[in-house]
Image (cartoon, coloured by chain):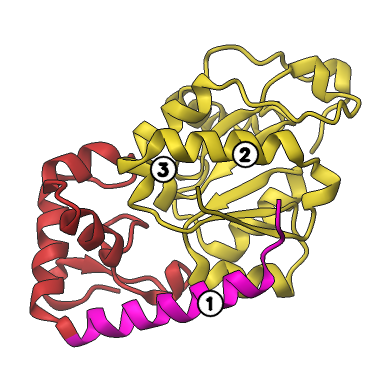
Chain colours: A red, B yellow
Amino acid sequence: MSLARDRVSRREGVKSGRPTVRDSKVTVLQAVDLADEGLSPERIAEEFYDIPSTAAVKDAIEWAEENPDRVSELRQRRADADERLREVAIDI
Amino acid sequence: MKLPAGDRPALTESTNPGTVSERITESTIPHLPREAIILDEDVNSKQFIRELRSRQLTYSDGRPGLGKFNRIQIVAAAHLFETTEDKPLLNWCEMHGYLLVTGNREDFVELGNTTTHSGILIVADKTGLVNRATAYGNEFERIFDNLSKSQIRNQIVRVAP
C-alpha cells in the first residue's frame, strides 16, 4: 500500500504499517532522525543497504515535513515503546 | 534444517551479504552458519556491520560447537527474504537458532513477549549505528562476552552504549 504520491511505503506486516522510506524497511522517522543529526539524504541512502535511492530518502523527508502531526504520533509511539522496552529488557 | 556439526561450512571472511543472498537464491539456506546474528533492515548500517565484523565476535562460554567456528557471522535480513515481515522473520530466526538485532522496539517488544524466540537485541538509538558505530560495536562485544545462547533465549536485550 502506498501513501500520498508514493513518496513513502506502508505494508501491514512491516513496522506495523508505519510509513517507511519507499521500497525499504527503514522507517521515515529513522530517516528524519538521521537527517536531523546532519546526515545528507545521499549519505543515508549510501549507509543503509535496504534503501533503494537518494530520491527515496528525499521523498520520505519531504513527506515528514508535510505531515508533522503524523510524525509527532510516530515519535510518541516510539517513546511509549522505549518505556516498555526498559521494563522488559534484561540487564547484561 | 540444521546440519550436523561435521557438515557445517567453516566460516570465512566471506561475510558479504550479497554472497549470502546468492546462497539463499540457490535454496541453500541450511548452509548458512549455525552461529549468526541476523540484522533487521533498520539496523543494516554499513558502518555498524563493519564494526561488528571487524571484532570477530564470539560467545565466551565455550559451548560445544562454538569453538569450531570461533566467530559469529553477521547476516543482513534484507538479503534473506524478498519482503521481511516482522513475525515471520522472528520465527525464522528461532527455527535456525539465530539472534535477531533490530531497532524496531514498537513491534518486537510485544512480539518478543508473546512469541518464543532465540533472543532479540534491540538498539535503543538507531542513529547511533551511523554516528557512534564504534561505541555500538563495543557494546555488542561486551554483550556477547557476557551472554550465551541459552541465557538470551526468549529474552530481550536493550543495547544502549
Q: Residue furthest right?
A: B64
- Residue B122: x, y in percent? 55, 57
Instruction: Residue at 81%, 35% (x, y): give it.
Output: B2
Q: Nearest to the eye among marks 1 and 3: give it.
A: 1
Mark 1: which amino acid?
Glu
Across and down, in percent, residue B135 comes to 45, 38
Residue A38: in magenta span = no
Identity of the residue drawn at 55% across and 40% down: B139
Using residue A14 as the reference point, say whether residue A1 is left or right of it. left
Q: Is residue B124 visible?
A: yes
Residue A83's tag is: 1
Q: Main secondary structure of the magenta part?
A: helix
x, y percent for residue B69: 74, 17
Could you give the CA–CA distance between mark 2 and mark 1, rounded to whole angstroms? 25 Å
Q: Secondary structure at mark 3?
A: loop
Identify the secondary structure beneath mark 1: helix
Q: Please give the label number shown on residue B44.
A: 3
Q: Is residue A89 above or below residue B125?
A: below
| Disc 2: which residue | B37
Label drawn at residue A41: none
Is residue A22 visible to us here?
no
Magenta-colored span:
A69-92
Q: Earlier in the sequence, mark 2 or mark 3?
A: 2
Residue B52 percent location from the top left of the image: 51, 30
- Please name the residue shown 28% across and 67% down the image: A29
- Pick whichever, A11 or B64, lies toward us: B64
Residue in the image at 51% along x and 62% along y: B85
Name the amino acid type tagged 2: Ile
Q: Please, is residue B119 above or below residue B46 in the view?
A: below
Specify the subunit that label 3 lies on.
Answer: B
